[in-house]
Amino acid sequence: MKRVVVGLSGGVDSSVAAYLLQEQGYEVIGLFMKNWHDDSVTISNECPWLEDSNDALLVAEKLGIPFQTVDLSEEYKDRIVDYMFKEYENGRTPNPDVLCNREIKFDVFLKIALSLGADYVATGHYCRKGTLQKDGKEIYQLLAGVDTNKDQSYFLCQLSQEQLSKSLFPIGELTKPQVREIAAKLDLITAEKKDSQGLCFIGKVRLPDFLQQKLQPKEGEIIEIDKDNSIYSKPKPQFDSLEDKLKFESEPFPYNSSMGKRVGKHQGAHYFTVGQRKGLNVGGTKEALFVIATDVITNTIYTGQGHDHPGLYRSVLRVKPHELHWVREDLKLQNGESMEVKARIRYRQELQKATLYQFESGLYVAFDKPQSAITEGQFVAWNRNDELVGSGVIS
C-alpha cells in the first residue's frame, strides 16, 4: 500500500484531496504546515493559522487519518520572506505563491514527507499530472486542471521532474462546485469555507503594512506621462539581428521626471507595482491613473491615464539565463531555436499566443499582441496545449 502525505491547509480543496486518496486505496497522512508566527504583522486579532490548523485537524479526525503540524516558519522566513523583501527593494514584484510551492511545499515539506516513509505528497491544487515514455524514460507532465476557471498549474510552474515524480493532485479532474459537493456530502467542516485570499502564508496581512515593517517609507514624486508623449512615437532603429530587435523591444521605456508633470507624492516606490491603480491618492484626473513604471533608484513613480495608456503595453519580455526553468527539460530550446507557445504573465490571465526565442543572452517571449503591465519579478509561464512546459522570471 502506497503512503501519501497530504498538505492539509484547513481549506476545502485539500480536505477533499485527502478523501479521494483514501478512496483510491492509499494510506493517507495529513500534515499542516505552519509557515508564520510573527503576530506583529497580522492585521486582525483572529489568528488565521490557528483556525486553519484546527479545521485541518477536524477534517483528519473525520476521515480517520493521522495528523500532525510541522513548523516551517524558519525555512519560510529564509526562503520566501527575505527573498520578497530583497526583490521589493530592488524594484521587482515577486510572486510568493509560486516560490512557496517550489521552495516549501515541494521541497522542505516533500523531504519531511519522504522521511515519514511516504511515496508521494499531495496538495489541493487544481491541476493534473501526466506521464509519457520518451527514449525509454518516464517523463512527467504538468497539465491544466479540468476546471478552467480554477486551473492552478501556473502556481506550480517552477516544479522540476524530480518534484513532479513524487506529487499527486487528486482534485485536478474536478471542478470547484464538485469539490464543495463532495465536502458537503461528507459533512466536512471546510465544505462552505471561503477560499483563502492573500499571501499563501500569512493570512490576513496587508502587503504595504508588511513591507513597511522592513522597508523604510521615503517620500518621492508621482509623475504623470501623457499618452501622446513623443517617447511612444519614436521611430524604431534598424536592427542587425533578430536578437537586437527583441532586446530593444523588451526594454522598458526610459522615463525621467522632466517628461511629465508632478501630480502627487508617495511614500516609497518599492510599495508600487506596474499596472496598479489603487493607493495613488491622486484625484482630479479624467481617467483612472495607472502605474506605468517605478524607479527605486530615484524613488519616482510614473503614471498614465486610462487602461489603454501606451506606457502599460509591451510585446516582448526577457528571461535571464539563470532565471529560466523548463518543467519539460527534454523540450528545452538550444541557442538560436524558437518555439510557438501560449503564455501568460499572471495567474488567471487567458493564455496568449507567443513565440519563444532562445539566445545566449536569455530567452525572449514575443507575444502576438501587446500585453498590459508586464511586471519585473513576476513569472511568465508557457504551455503547449494544456501542458505547462516551462517558466521564468520576467527581467
Image (spheres, rainbow, N blue to C red):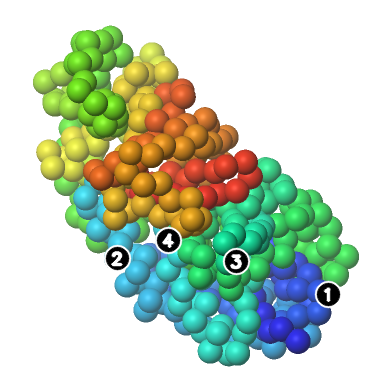
Task: In the rendered structure, find residue 82 and report the number of the disc placed on it.
Answer: 2
Please give the name of the residue rendered at 84% of the width and 69% of the height, measured from the top-left corner: 187
Quadrant assignment for the C terminus:
top left
Per the image, label 4 sits on a secondary structure element best described as: helix
Choose between 332 and 65: the one closer to the eye: 332
Q: Which residue position holds label 1? A: 23
Q: Nearer the viewer, mark 2 or mark 4?
A: 4
Tell me where residue 170 appears, x and y as whole percent.
72, 65
Disc 4 marks which amino acid?
Answer: Leu
Q: Residues within 10 Å of mark 3 (few under 14, many from 20)?
A: few
Q: Earlier in the sequence, mark 3 or mark 4?
A: 4
Disc 3 marks which amino acid?
Answer: Gly
Q: Which residue position holds label 4? A: 99
Please give the name of the residue rendered at 62% of the width and 85% of the height, measured from the top-left corner: 118
Q: How far separated are the C-alphas under marks 2 and 4?
A: 12 Å
Per the image, label 2 sits on a secondary structure element best described as: helix
Q: How far separated are the C-alphas under marks 1 and 2?
A: 40 Å
Per the image, label 1 sits on a secondary structure element best described as: helix
Q: Residues within 10 Å of mark 4 (few under 14, many from 20)?
A: many
Tell me where residue 270 appears, x and y as whole percent.
25, 46
Choose between 323 and 171: the one closer to the eye: 323
Q: How far separated are the C-alphas under marks 3 and 4?
A: 32 Å
Q: Earlier in the sequence, mark 1 or mark 4?
A: 1
Q: Earlier in the sequence, mark 1 or mark 2?
A: 1
Q: How far separated are the C-alphas under marks 2 and 3?
A: 42 Å
Left or right: 259 with respect to 177? left
Disc 1 marks which amino acid?
Answer: Glu
Please give the name of the residue rendered at 38% of the width and 39% of the height, measured from the top-left corner: 337
Disc 2 marks which amino acid?
Answer: Asp
Q: Which residue position holds label 3? A: 136
Contact (Cβ within 8 Å) of mark 1 with mark 4: no
Per the image, label 3 sits on a secondary structure element best described as: loop
